[in-house]
Amino acid sequence: FPQRLLNCPDHPTLLYFKGNANLNAEKVISIIGTRSNSIYGKQVTEQLIHSIPPDVLVISGLAFGIDAIAHRAALNNNLSTVGVLAHGLDDLYPSQHRSLAKEMLNKGGLLTEFTQHTLANKYNFPRRNRIVAGMADATIVIETAVKGGSMITADLAFHYNRELFAVPGRINDERSKGCLQLIQQNKAIVYTNATAFMETMGWENKQQTPLQQLSFFATLTEEEQLIVQVLKEKDLFTVDELYKRVGLNSSRMAAALLSLEIQHIIHIIPGKMVALS
């Protein structure tokens, strides 16, 4: 039984689990967010999971959007990941995630408080959310609307006295307004990058193996890979030099540079200089 849940006043008395994860791992985080995520939300989630220690257990709800992205990123980075379900173990909702769930059984698992033949109805999801929040040392909200389901989980984590982080976004983006509200109300710590997150948690960064580095490189677009290869040639390039060397049109180049900067792979230096981070 996940011991962290026992500190929650409304914890379930019985859980059903399928998989091989250690539910009492030394480090456990929950990653939550909207089902209709942006590219920015996907990139932040993937970069976070790519940078956290290999002994961290990643919890989420196996829903569309940020949940599925978090589970997939954990598997890709050889981290254990558990999906908390709002129904019995004999079913899988959404059905589109059956393949993902099957992979998770070999590197994590599926967890629920609901008996077999219990369907995923709307009343079960808030109950599921208290397990997502209560199992973790920290909950990270990637993107959510003010009335999104992730706000329920965030509020639970806050009242369970767990660390709560929220990713800031554009003030006119509905998918970021919930995160901004959590920050404004001093409920959540601003999430800026994985290094700062791990410092707050007192966790050390993991050393990436060459295989992991190659795996991450393979997730970049062709344009992003080309830019990274050119930047490896010397410490600094001017933006103009980079444009000439890479040979992309201005819109594709600008989009690729922005994406790489968001992922903390490059940084832009005053004077229009570009370097690998």
Image (cartoon, helix red, strand yellow):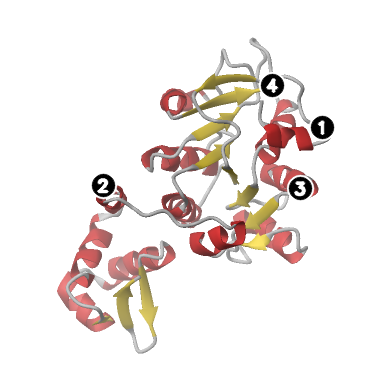
SS class, disc 4: loop
- Drawn side of residue 57 relative to residue 141, left or right: left
Tell us which disc is closer to us: 3 or 1. Answer: 1
Residue plotted at (28% across, 69% down):
253
* Residue 196 image point, x, y percent: 54, 64
Q: Is residue 23 above or below residue 87?
A: below
Task: Give the alpha-carbon distance from disc 1 to disc 2, as whole Å.
Answer: 43 Å
SS class, disc 2: helix
Amino acid type shown at disc 1: Asp
Quadrant housing residue 153:
top right
Tell us which disc is closer to us: 2 or 4. Answer: 2
Quarter of the picture containing the C terminus is: bottom left
Task: Give the alpha-carbon distance from disc 3 to disc 2, as whole Å.
Answer: 38 Å
Amino acid type shown at disc 2: Leu
Q: Nearer the viewer, residue 51 or 266?
A: 51
Quarter of the picture containing the N terminus is: top right
Amino acid type shown at disc 3: Asp
Residue indicated by mark 2: 211
- Which of the two discs, 3 and 4, labels the residue nearer the N terminus? 4
Residue indicated by mark 4: 113
Kindly check if marks 3 and 1 are in contact, taking CB atoms under 8 A apart as contact. no
